Image (spheres, rainbow, N blue to C red):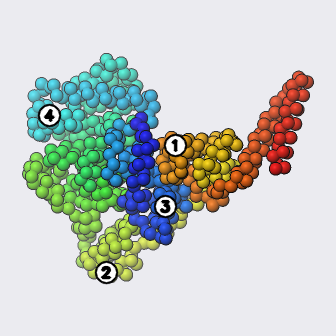
Amino acid sequence: MARLQNEDINRVRQSADISEVISQYIPIEKKGRNFVAICPFHDDNNPSLTISPDKQIYKCFVCGAGGNVFTFVQNYNKVSFIEAVDTVAKSVNIDLNINTTQVNYNISDSQKEYFKITEDATNFLNFQLTNTSNQVLIDYLDKRKLTAKEIDYFNVGYEEDHSLVNFLKRKGYKDSDLVDINLVHDTDYGFRSVFNNRLVFPIHDRYQNVVGYSGRILFDDKDSAKYVNSNENVIYTKGDVLYNFHRAKDDAKREGESFLVEGVMDCIAFYQADVYNSVATLGTALTVNQASQIRTLAPKVVIAFDGDNAGKMATVKAIDVLLDHNLKIEVLVSFKNLDPDDFLKKYGKEEFNNKLKIRLSWMDFLIQYFNEKYNLDNFEERKEFTVTLAKFKSKIKDNFDQEYFLNKIAKITNFTASQISQLIPETKNIVSQPKLVKRRNRSLRNRVEYNIIGQMLTGKEAAFYIRDNLGYLTEDSLNRLYSLLIDYYFHNDEIVIADVISKINQEDEELSPLFLEIINSDNVIKEYDKEIIDENIGLIEVKLIERNIKDLRSKNTIDDSEKALQAKKIAELNLRKSEILEK
């Protein structure tokens, strides 16, 4: 797995102001020295997220979410730590020269085997297509205007006469693995390929692993589906994947927007029109996970679904999901009820690119769409139209945009803003009231060790004094945090909390909630006082002695000499305990 140097991580972190970065994702409001915001990590109605520019950290005091700028981007975008660092780096024009598509998540040995299978399958199918002498297939490619350029770029393949099954078996792969990833069916006639006699388009996850396929039949047949997509399986979850994401990523960031389309051929049409920032849902309803990935591409998304009624309905549902991700949303409405692929073939590249400039805001699209569904001359339908649209108001975070939207509705319905407000159902947040963060039920020893960590944060002198006089802590997670802080001070003279969080995220991410609890607690001592440190060290030593005495007493021995030695050790430990407590 790729790894960044701490120096690079800190350089990016120090170049990026956390409040500016977070404001690119959610609206924030100045409050004293800090900023506050509606927390995006739980169902929040009142601003519970506090952002500290001084400390360069954020913290939600309701759900407990917190960290530095990288933590926010990582959790908001649901990406790896390195991907979050890369995203922040690009926002401040720092090139870390890493390929985040190669930054893979932790995968099991079985998943690695599955990905080897899909890689071999993809290469084989692509070879079959590029070396075909099948005139029917060649004619089809010509008809669809799929040239060698598109075939190579999208790794398009073709399977004929179940050749893939035989190839993979010769490679030594197990039948059960091929079934697990939905490449073959186990039938009464033996193992048969899922994509036989179809043009095959590999589906990649954002790490460039092939996780599935979309197979297109060459001739429309009422007895066969036009497209067959991989079923969900051990490596493929439809709602987690956007087709063409890994290719569109850099261009979307450069252009500041992405295009959201329905199918494989739509993405290819955009590519043929020299537009390289499109991703596809592959015909499924847009999911929350897919919307999160779209947000990582660019701050704006342009929906370019089919212009038929089904496409418009899908657009409405997509808008509803995307609004929760602080995206600027526009809708293409200029393809004359054709999908992008058909429009390109009929009107050509120049006209296609001209039409890409004709867009509606999501508000105007919804008003136009529902205006066609209701008879606004009828009072009851006009009310229903208003209620349907007004439901989207709660999704709008900006007060100006909310007022603009309501005024648009008022203008078309002739209702007043007051009347419209009465029609908006009250959202009584009973079920989803956020619970306060559960605090750790800390023992005396833990409270003392929390104080030790708090005192280490006052500076290098305190940290090394504790190291020299204590050695280690008793609880595993606290001891790991203690060791990490000692290591931090070996490389830094002064502590920067935001940089410590980066180090934790890079080296031992499980410690992040513990560290945030300590730095945000008002009950943890955070001052350098040797007398208090010595007292805390003494209390920890007492607890260690008590643990050792308990362990000794639990040992059953019948040997008199061992019993005498055991009693002597316990007496010595009790003496040491008394000396510490008398100090």
Separation of marks 4 and 2 at Cα, in angstroms: 58 Å
The alpha-carbon separation of the residues under discs 1 and 2 comes to: 66 Å
Dot 1 lies on which element? helix
User: Front-most of 126 and 262?
Assistant: 126
Q: Which residue is mark 3?
A: 54
Q: Which residue is mark 2?
A: 415
Residue 8 or residue 38, whichever sits in front: 8
Q: Residues within 10 Å of mark 3 (few under 14, many from 20)?
A: few
- Which of the two marks, 3 or 4, is nearer to us in this view? 3
Amino acid type indicated by mark 4: Ala
Which residue is disc 1 drawn over?
491
For the residue carrying disc 4, how many other residues have a C-alpha within 10 Å: few (<14), some (14-19), or many (20+)? few
- Find out whether the residues at labels 4 and 2 contact each other: C-beta distance under 8 Å: no
Q: Position of residue 528 (x, y in %)?
A: 65, 55
Relative depth, front residue between 339 and 293: 293
Is 131 situated left or right of 453 in this image? left
Disc 3 secondary structure class: loop
Q: Which residue lies under the disc numbered 4?
A: 148
Residue 366 rendering spot, x and y as whole percentages: 27, 65
Residue 318 appears in the picture as rendered: yes
Residue 312 pos. (x, y %): 25, 58
Which residue sits at x=24%, y=48%?
Answer: 251
